[in-house]
């Protein structure tokens, strides 16, 4: 219903614009009356123009777009609600008739069996390498941690880094507190 009303409003707006545009074109192209000999064709057209009628074209365009929107919304809501259950029932019947579910179950079981065997063979092949890699990582960790702990340069750098981090954290906290509680007019900043 809304689509029909917008469509009829659009048509009437377009007709009003078309008729007025034709009147303006006739006024601009016809011979001027004797009392307006010195007035140019553009001025005569401007004097003849009614802006409300000229504004009907953009309004007609807006109503056309709204009509299209309403029609699409109706189609998107109404037709699936009306036809989807029947189509779903027919699709299920055809799937049962052509044994689609049985084929899908068989394919899924074959895929599961193949992926399981591939996983087991890959894990068996990678197990010795994984254990060797974990041992090497543990050795490197131990060497690195003992080197860093015994190095005075690394210890000093770590200490300075911790001090700098705590100072930055304290400054950020102070700035955040200033933002949270702005000073009043009588207070002064430190």
Image (spheres, helix red, strand yellow):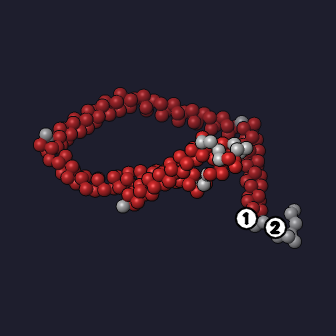
Identified at 51% across, 50% down, the residue is 19
Q: Quadrant of residue 170?
A: bottom right
Question: Circle 2 — which element?
Answer: loop
Q: Nearer the viewer, residue 100 or 30?
A: 30
Asked if 94 appears above or below 186 in the picture, the reply is above
Which residue is rendered at x = 38% and y = 29% of the image? 126
Q: Which residue is mark 2?
A: 183
Front one among 67 and 167: 67
Q: Could you tell me if residue 66 is visible in this image? A: no
Q: Is residue 121 left or right of residue 165?
A: left
Residue toward you, 105 or 120: 105
Q: Is 15 positioned to the left or the right of 24 in the image?
A: left
Farthest-out residue, left: 97
Q: Indicate the position of residue 79 as horizontal and vertical percent values.
A: 29, 53
The quarter of the image holding the N terminus is bottom left
Q: Quadrant of residue 115?
A: top left
Could you classify mark 2 by the number of other residues whose Cα lies within 10 Å: few (under 14), some (14-19), or many (20 or more)? Answer: few
Residue assigned mark 1: 180
Residue at the image position 13 percent from the left and 40 percent from the top: 98
Please tell me whether residue 186 is drawn above or below residue 173 in the rendered image: below
x, y (%) of residue 163? 76, 49
| Mark identifier at residue 127 | none
Residue 14 percent location from the top left of the image: 48, 51
Q: Is residue 169 left or right of residue 54?
A: right
Question: How far across and how far down the image is residue 152, in percent?
Answer: 75, 38
């Amino acid at each position: 219903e809304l689509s029909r009303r917008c469509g009829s409003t659009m048509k009437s707006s377009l007709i009003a614009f078309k008729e007025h545009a034709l009147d303006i074109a006739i006024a601009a192209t016809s011979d001027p009356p004797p009392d307006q000999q010195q007035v140019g064709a553009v001025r005569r057209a401007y004097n003849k123009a009614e802006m409300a009628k000229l504004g009907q074209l953009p309004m007609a365009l807006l109503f056309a777009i709204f009509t299209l929107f309403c029609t699409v919304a109706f189609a998107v809501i109404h037709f699936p609600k009306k036809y989807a259950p029947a189509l779903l029932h027919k699709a299920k019947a055809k799937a049962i008739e052509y044994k689609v579910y049985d084929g899908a179950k068989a394919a899924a079981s074959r895929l599961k069996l193949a992926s399981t065997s591939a996983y087991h063979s890959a894990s068996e092949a990678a197990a010795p390498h994984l254990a060797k890699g974990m041992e090497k990582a543990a050795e490197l960790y131990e060497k690195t941690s003992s080197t860093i702990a015994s190095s005075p340069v690394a210890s000093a750098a770590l200490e300075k880094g911790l001090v700098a981090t705590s100072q930055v954290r304290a400054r950020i906290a102070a700035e955040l507190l200033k933002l949270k509680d702005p000073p009043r007019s009588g207070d002064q900043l430190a």
